Image: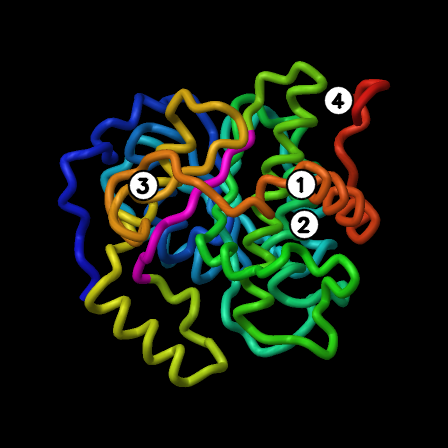
Amino acid sequence: MAKTLKSSGWNTTRLPDLTGRTAVVTGANSGIGLAAAGALAHAGARVVLAVRDTDRGEAAAATVTGTRGPLDVRRLDLADLASVREFAASWQGDLDLLINNAGVGGAAEGRTSDGFETHFGTNHLGHFALTNLLLPHITDRLVTVASNTHKFSGNGMHFDNLNLTGEYAPMRAYSQSKLANLLFTLELQRRLGAVGSPVRALAAHPGWAATNLASHDTVLLRRIGIQLGNRFIAQDSEAGALPTLYAAVQDLPGASYVGPDGMGEHRGAPTLVGRIPAASDPEAARRLWTVSEELTGVAFPERLRVATNI
């Protein structure tokens, strides 16, 4: 059984009153996404659970009780850019907070509806498109859930083979997608700063949280190892959601990266953490942005552009 965080550090009791604010959490039908959505709703926010399976989303929302803000469920399949566009086109009004939480990990080699490698297409490109399409509505900040497995991405993004054709391995694909999350956050914050936007882009990782993310890992020994780690090392989903929530409400600089403060950043109270040099490379971040625009057909909103630096 995963262990509940017992740190005396920052926790959900220190969330501010979020009454009147609206948040979208992708992949919020389980794990840290559901935990984050529930915590925000308990603090008074209206929270939209953006999920691929609305039946599962409704069932998950029904498990969250005693909230002061409503929980809504809407369909969003990040592995299908048509679904991303449909979700964004239907949005009306302001959006205070976007949490890019959904993800796949350890999957067998496959492709999204648009032909992209599953991890890169879902974890990065889907959120890249969603963020830029919703950005004109966002008033405060967005938080993208990355992972410390970005440290296993080797020499950086495989720009010459982003689909990893002929060199696919589940961990390589997952770590590349998480590196992409951090580079995306870096370049998005640069662009927001260049146009004088008050919106901030941040990233967070949950440490080792007991979720079902790797339940379909194709490598049996790794799957067993993850299951054992979930039982004896990991913290529960509520604790795993704390870095995301901390990034969502604390007064932090744009492009900050938040994770647990314990040994190896596996568990603990949220704090600012580091990343590998490849995740802080501004040139790689700009290159990834350009490639992502070409692949998705979605760009930084025209009305937010300026003549220089964008």
Q: In front of the other: label 1 or label 3?
A: 3
Q: Compare marks 4 and 1 and give the one earlier in the sequence.
A: 1
Which residue appears farthest toward the bottom when viewing the image? Answer: 220
State how far apart marks 2 and 1 are (Cα): 6 Å
Query: Hey, what amino acid is under mark 3?
Result: Leu
Residue 261: x %, y % from top left: 28, 42
Q: Which mark is residue 242?
A: 3
Give the main secondary structure of the magenta stretch.
loop
The span shown in magenta is 201-210
Q: Classify 10 Å Cα crowding around label 2: few (below 14), some (14-19), many (20 and above).
A: many
Residue at image mark 1? 88
The residue shown at (60%, 47%) is: 278
Q: Quadrant of the C terminus?
A: top right
Residue at image mark 2? 84
Residue at image mark 4? 304
Determine if the magenta segment contains residue 104.
Answer: no
Residue 177: x %, y % from top left: 59, 57
Query: Hey, what amino acid is under mark 2?
Result: Val
Query: Hey, what amino acid is under mark 1?
Result: Ala
Residue 6: x %, y % from top left: 13, 45
Choose top left, top right, bottom left or bottom right for residue 11. top left
Q: Compare marks 4 and 2 and give the one earlier in the sequence.
A: 2
